[in-house]
């Protein structure tokens, strides 16, 4: 629906509604409520890719105002709800001198609200992710938002709450001169 130019989405809907309803049928036996559940699920995924289900000619999805505004601030809500691992806070006690220097420098900028780009470099296995983990936990423990992103899925998956850059910032696959990302400020 998002990346291909489907000519008949309504037919896709008609053909696959039954299969898409399968999980929802376990908890509900009212067909119109099940249909709404499927639509909400599709809407959820479309919103995460910067799209609006109302533009696809599917049956109307009944979202409350609260749900609509929640979806609008969804990235924010997601990042706020990650929670952090208490054990990761303790990592700071085990950092080596170089990791600690990076930790203190980066955290100092966070605490003083000073914008800065840091580039943490080192051969594989020297503790970069280890450092990120404790930094992420520390900043989240202060009720601040951390957007943990990486260019590859594997790198993203080893960071707490990590997402690929393309997914988090909704970077379009096809880029042109006026392409824009879509991320809630
Ligand atoms: N200061 C430390 N004390 C104890 N263990 C550490 C320390 N720093 C790193 N490690 C451990 O070393 C291993 C490699 O660290 P990590 O995965 O953070 O490296 P990396 O630099 O991110 O590697 P890569 O570049 O391959 O992703 C991990 O098991 C980690 O727990």
Image (cartoon, rainbow, N blue to C red):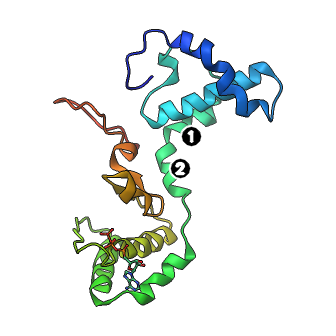
Q: How many marks?
A: 2
Vertical comparison of 97 with 73: above or below: below
Give me the residue at 48% from left, 58% from top: 161
Element under label 1?
helix
Q: Mark 1 packing: few (<14 Cα in 10 Å), some, or many (20+)?
A: few
Element under label 2?
helix
Is residue 4 visible in the rendered image? The answer is: yes
Q: Determine which quarter of the picture holds residue 118.
A: bottom left
Which of the marked residues, 1 or 2, is nearer the chain's N terminus? Answer: 1
Is residue 57 visible in the rendered image? The answer is: no
**Viewport quadrant of the N terminus:** top left
Nearer-the-camera pick, 171 or 22: 22
Give me the residue at 65% from left, 26% from top: 20
Q: Is residue 84 left or right of residue 185?
A: right
Q: Which residue is mark 1?
A: 70
Nearer-the-camera pick, 53 or 110: 53
**C-alpha distance separating marks 1 and 2:** 8 Å
Q: Are marks 1 and 2 in contact (CB under 8 Å)?
A: yes
Q: Which mark is drawn over residue 77?
A: 2
Give me the residue at 52% from left, 23% from top: 53
* Image coordinates for residue 10, horizontal then vertical, percent: 55, 11
Q: Is residue 35 left or right of residue 103?
A: right
* Image coordinates for residue 69, horizontal then vertical, percent: 55, 37
């Amino acid at each position: 629906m998002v990346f291909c130019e489907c000519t008949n989405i309504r037919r896709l809907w008609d053909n696959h509604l039954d299969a898409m309803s399968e999980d929802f049928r376990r908890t509900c036996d009212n067909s119109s409520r099940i249909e709404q559940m499927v639509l909400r699920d599709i809407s959820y995924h479309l919103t995460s890719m910067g799209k609006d289900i109302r533009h696809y000619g599917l049956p109307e999805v009944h979202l409350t105002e609260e749900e609509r505004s929640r979806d609008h601030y969804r990235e924010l809500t997601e990042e706020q709800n990650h929670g952090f691992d208490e054990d990761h806070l303790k990592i700071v006690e085990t950092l080596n001198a170089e990791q600690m220097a990076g930790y203190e420098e980066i955290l100092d900028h966070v605490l003083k609200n000073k914008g800065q780009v840091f580039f943490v470099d080192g051969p594989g296995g020297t503790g970069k992710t280890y450092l990120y983990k404790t930094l992420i936990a520390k900043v989240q423990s202060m009720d601040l938002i951390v957007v943990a992103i990486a260019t590859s899925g594997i790198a993203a998956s080893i960071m707490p709450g990590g997402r690929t850059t393309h997914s988090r910032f909704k970077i379009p696959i096809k880029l042109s001169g006026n392409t824009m990302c879509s991320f809630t400020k």
